[in-house]
Image: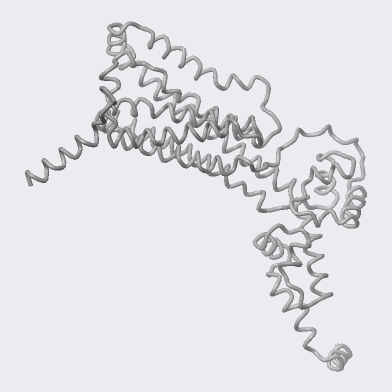
Amino acid sequence: MDTLALTVAVHWRDMTTTEGCGVLRFGPWSTTLGLAAAFGALVALLLWCARGNRSAQRLLATLLIVAVLRLMPYVLGFAGAYDAWPWLSFAPFDLRLAIGPLLYLYLLRLATPGLPPRWGWHLAPAALDLLYMLWAFALPLEQKHLWEARVHGPWISPLQDAAGALSLGVYLWLAARLRRRYLGWLRDHTSDRDMQRQPWVASVLLAIFLWLIVSVGFDLYSALVTPLTYYDRFPQYLAFSAIILWLGLEGWRHAGRDFPQMRRVAPPAPAGRDWQATADAWHARIRAEGWWRQPGLSLTDVAQRLGTNESYVSRAFNQGLGRNFNGAINAMRVDAVQAGMRDDPAVELLKLGLDCGFSSKASFNRVFREQTGVSPSVWRATHITKSLEIPASEATSLARQA
């Protein structure tokens, strides 16, 4: 047992000492966190240079950089940097008050054509906290130690923890509310159900929610159970590393994706307009022109072709036809599929569905079932195939008996 312990100790020493690194000792802990930080920084650089939806991608890149900076005290600390250079204390790596606002602004930019006026005020608390950290960082070393012991440690640090958790919780709530509004808008303005799911929006919300849970969990344990040391918090930053990897990979995967964007509501329509007649005319034109065959057809597309605005078209469908845009367009598609099965009972159902504007097999089956109560194959077997099996003379006899 003693030999085994000595072997493990020597092996650990070899891993935590690198020739040529001077006083720094990059061991397993600092290397693990450092690799995650390097990956996050690389993805942030790629997102910053991405061409599609540039302002949104730069907000996500900034969010990743803030998350990477959150790791840096532990990357450097486990490598011995703070022992070698004590003046690094109060280096402004912790910008936690910026995480929530950046999340909200990123999702807002994905869902809308632009950010609202004075959006920078969302980052004002983070800027004030940064100014404080820069001031403390500039203090002479002895004054830093005194400030840490008498003021920052007992008073300011707990306030920063509480403010960071509160800020992130509030902005997560705002972002979740924005997502609900966005998904509702998509249901009313797009005909493709797959487009209406937007899994990336849910994924980024979940990632930041996990970040909040991990942060608050460790802070509460340290405050209420037993104070956590620098080393005790390694699992917390290991979890942060996993979240950075997740955000980086998924963020880059969705960087080139087009997100339908909510537009401003148009002015109210003139009073006394006959919405039923308007809706009937527009509905007939959409059907005659075959616009419903376009996968992913949106309310914006239809409004532009009709020479009007989205608000009028949406109101016409809802008040004139009693159904939203999504339901009306998909009803046309289902009608066309049923007509196609009547014309050719042996037609390939998936090809027919795609020709009628459905974007995928899953979307075709789901919408058809919603409109008719059964799947396309069951509807064909019930309404077409069985009727074809009855001989003509027998069908005539049955008709006379009825």
Vertical position of residue 133 compared to residue 358: above or below: above
When asked about the image quadrant of residue 210, the answer is top left
Q: Position of residue 151 (x, y in %)?
A: 32, 11
Q: Nearer the viewer, residue 180 or 289?
A: 289
Q: Percent x, y for residue 28?
A: 29, 37
Considering only vertical position in the picture, is 115 above or below 189? above
- Is residue 229 toward the left or the right of residue 288 in the image? left
Number of numbered callouts drawn = 0
Answer with the quarter of the image where residue 227 lies: top left
Name the residue: 31% across, 10% down. Answer: 144
312 relative to 114, above or below: below
Front-lying residue, 329 or 71: 71
Quarter of the figure that contains the C terminus: bottom right
Q: Residue furthest front?
A: 20
Q: Which of the colour schemes (rainbow, by chain, secondary structure, one colour) is used?
A: one colour
Res. 115 image quadrant: top right
Where residue 62 appears, as percent x and y from the top left, is: 53, 28
x, y percent for residue 361: 67, 63
Q: Is residue 209 left or right of residue 292?
A: left
Q: Residue at x 74, y 48 (%)?
A: 190
**Residue at (79%, 60%) from the top-left corner?**
331
Task: Please report the residue visible at 69 percent of the width from the left and 34 percent of the height from the top.
Answer: 112
Residue with the most extreme left position = 2
